[in-house]
Each structure stands twice: as structure tokens, then as C-alpha cells.
Image (tube, coloured by chain):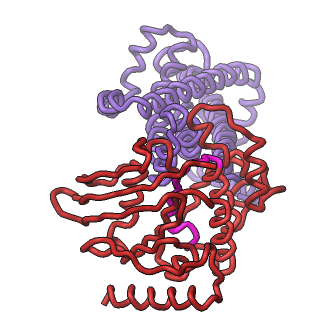
Amino acid sequence: MLDAPRIYLKGQHVIAGDHLFSAELCLPAGRWTCLLGPSGIGKSTILRLILGLETGGDFNGSIQASDDAGLDGRVSFMAQSDLLLPWLSVLDNIVIGAQLRGETPDYERAKSLLERVGLSGHQNKKPPTLSGGMRQRTALARTLMEDRPVVLLDEPFSALDAGTRADMQELAAEVLHGRTVLLVTHEPAEAARLSHQILVMTAKGIDIWPSPKAEIPRDITAEKTLSCQGALLEHLREMTL
Amino acid sequence: MRRRDILFALLLGLGIWQALVWITGAPHFILPSPWRVAQAAYKSRVIILDNAWITALEVLLGLLLGSLLGVATAVQLTLFKTAERLMLPILVFTQAVPVFALAPLLTLWFGYGIGSKVVMAVLIIYFPVTSAFHDGLSQTSQGYRDLGASMGATRFQFLRYVQIPNALPSLGTGLRLAAVYAPIGAVIGEWVGASKGLGYLMLLANGRAKTDLMFAALIVLACLTVLLHIAISKLALRLTKYAEGR
């Protein structure tokens, strides 16, 4: 199995001299962390910082992995928009990472991943012919194909209908097991189902919110999941008042 | 457009033309009737076809070379940011020079043969193709860029697998413009100095007051341009469909 590292981030993000946010957070190794908070507070920026992408500002601080190795090439991400290339088949979309690095793609592995996300038989289809759920399954298979120990998810299921979303949450929890996952979401229900650790971000900083003890993905109807979801929703509402 | 509509428009055009001939009572060397032009076209069919072939060759060669050059330039501008900063202003500046004014010079440099006309066509379509494709290549969404960066994409592979396919509809737009401009370039080249081609034939007919032949040559030229436009539009539609995964 992968050696998924713990990730520790601490620092301030500044755009053109304006202090945007201070943050300190720890992503436990091989566990799911959900990050919630009002829109525009900087959740996606944290994700971009860990990915090493341009944020339009400066970050004064540090991002460290527990094994002291750099994060370069060890993080993959999945966004709300599936980012599939419409001109490529499902199979070619899954191996796009290898193509972009100029490596020879492993089509056999790609096919087995397609089977794993329930898309066998669709490998030659073009993304525009697929449903939203199938497209996100393809994007998930592409993320798995990268086989990185750290996976960052930016509201990947928010555009799906409720039933498909619940299916995707279960599938993602299953196939990303053992990786260090950070899920940015607006959905208290999603956080209550999928988090080992729930973080709530405000302008002042990041607070830990108690999450249920059960293994993920948690039963939607379980009392502890529902009460966590309810309390979290109440808390988020109070913040926006 | 439905076929019936096209036929109707054609008949309407011919009707207006004939009506003008009747109303103005102009002599045939000023405004020949459609029938007279048809007769002239039939009588001179060999000479018209000969010259049409030359013009078509100039246009097609110009289109091919101009498009290849434009595509290569756009790719190079995208890959090398320094080139982009240096070359883009120069490219825009060269557009301030009317290409037609260069025609005599081109004839001097490349001779009376098809060479100078091909160069003329190349010059006139080079910028629209370059600028349309370069715009398309620059418009890769931030999402794709992030994905590429997180996957460790090389610049060249990203261009090949993401930017170029994504820019194909823009290239189609540039090619459609080029298909309209290329015949203009070739014919102007022929006007300035040539021994063959539809533009040359038109000047020749004009000089000998054979206005009916001039009209015939003009109509053949228009038909060539329309055919080219249809063909390139089909190609452009294909490029767009490919990029959209249809």
C-alpha cells in the first residue's frame, strides 16, 4: 500500500499586501479531512497551495509532509468540473497524465480502474455522451490512475443529483482508502459521512469540529451521522449571520 | 440554405441583371446580357478553364502554405513567451502595410509566373490564420492548466494533447477567413503582372472590349471562391465537432 504522509500547513496568505487569511491545519495520514466554510474564505486557495499551483497571492508559511519529502508529484486533484477532454475517449482521458508527461500509458491498468469505478463497456465513448455521474466516475478513475498518496477534492460531487452523489461518495471513500484526502465541500451531509476530521474555516482561522467515530463512508441514516450533519449546518448558518 | 432557395436566388439575380440590361439599354460592351455572357463563356470555354486552373492552383497553394506558416507561427508564439512578446507587435504592425501595395514588388521578386501570386495569397492569409489559432491556443481554461500542472505535464505535451485540440475551432474560423481572402490575393497578383490566370484574362478581355468574356471570367472566379468557401466551411465544422467530442 501507499505510504500516505501526514500534511501540515501553517501560514498567512496575502494578496497585494492585503491579509487574506491565516491558517493552520493538519491532514492526518491516510485519512479523510473535510474543509468547510463560507464562500470566498480561501478553502480552494488552501487546496491550490498544497497542490503547488498559482494562487494569485503570496503565502508566508510552510507546508510539510510527515516524511519530510517534498509534495511535488505526490498530490493529485479532482474538481467540481470534471475537466475531461471532450475530444478524447473515456480510456484516453484516464491515461492523460502519462501522455502529458510523455510517458507510455498503461492501458491495462486503466481498463481495470474503469471496471473498478463501474464504467467497463464505456471506454470508447466520448465524455459529452456520458451523464454527469459517469463523467465524475471517469474523473475519479483518472485521479486513481495517477496513483498519488495525497488526493485533494474540490467539491467534486456538488453538481450531481442527490442519489448519484451518495453513490459517488461511497465509491470515492472505497477507492481512495488509505490515502491522505482533503475534501473541500459546502455540504454538511457530505462532511458528516466522509470525514475522519472536520475543519471549519473562518477569517480568524481553522477550527476542528467533532466528527462521528464510525468508519467511512458512514450510514446516511445513522443517528450520529445525522446529528453531526444537523449541528454542523446550524454552526455554518450562525457564521453567515 | 435549401437547394430550392439557392436556385431561386440565382434566377432572381439573373432576372435583375437582364432587367438592368433592358432598362438602361446599355450597349453590350458596357453591360452584356446574361445570355451573351453564357455564349461567350461557352465559346471561350477552353481558354477560361486553362486560366481558371492556374488561378485555382495559386489559391490552393497559397492557402496551404499560408495556413501551414500561420499554424507554425501560432504554435511557436505559444511555446516561447519571449517570441510572443517580440513578434506579436511586429505581426500587428505588418498588417498596417496594405498587402496590395506590395504586389508590384512581389512581381519584381518572384516573376510573372504563379510564384508571386502564391506569395501574395500567403501574405494575405498568414495573419488571420496566425491570429485566430494563437487566440485559440491562448484560451485554454484555467481548469485544464491546473490539471496539467498537477500532473507534471511538459509544455510540449500539454500543447499537443490539450491546447491544440482545444484550439481547433478557432483554427477553423481563421481558415474560413483565409478561404475568402486567398482568391483576392491571387487575382490582385495577376492584375499587377501575369501571363495566365482569371485575373489576367479579365484584364485582357477588358482591354479588347470583350466585356462578355470578362463577365464570364468573373463568374467562374466567383464560383471557384464559393466552392472553396463551402469546402473549407465543412472542414471547419469537422474541426469544431472533433473538439467538442461529437
Name the one closer to the observer, B184 or B40. Answer: B184
Q: Is residue A132 above or below residue B77?
A: below
Tell me the purple chain: B
At horizontal 61% and vertical 15% (from top left) the residue drawn is B196
Horizontally, residue A73 falls left or right of residue A159, namely left
The chain assigned the colour red in the figure is A
Which residue is drawn at the image coordinates 48% and 31% (left, top)? B75
- Considering depth in this image, is A191 or B129 the residue closer to the camera? A191
- Give the residue at the far right of this rendering: A121
Q: Which quarter of the rendering shows the C terminus of chain A?
A: bottom left
| A117 displayed left or right of B170 | right
The magenta span reads A145-158
Q: Is residue B10 magenta?
A: no
Quarter of the rendering containing residue A214: bottom right
Q: Is residue A229 above or below residue A98?
A: below
State the residue at coordinates (23%, 65%).
A20
Q: Which quarter of the figure has residue B208? A: top right
| Residue B5 in picture, x, y percent from top left | 73, 59
Q: Is residue A191 above or below residue A33?
A: below
> Residue at 42% of width from left, 75% of height from top?
A36
Residue A21 position, x and y percent, is 25, 66
Q: Nearer the viewer, residue B118 or B131?
A: B131
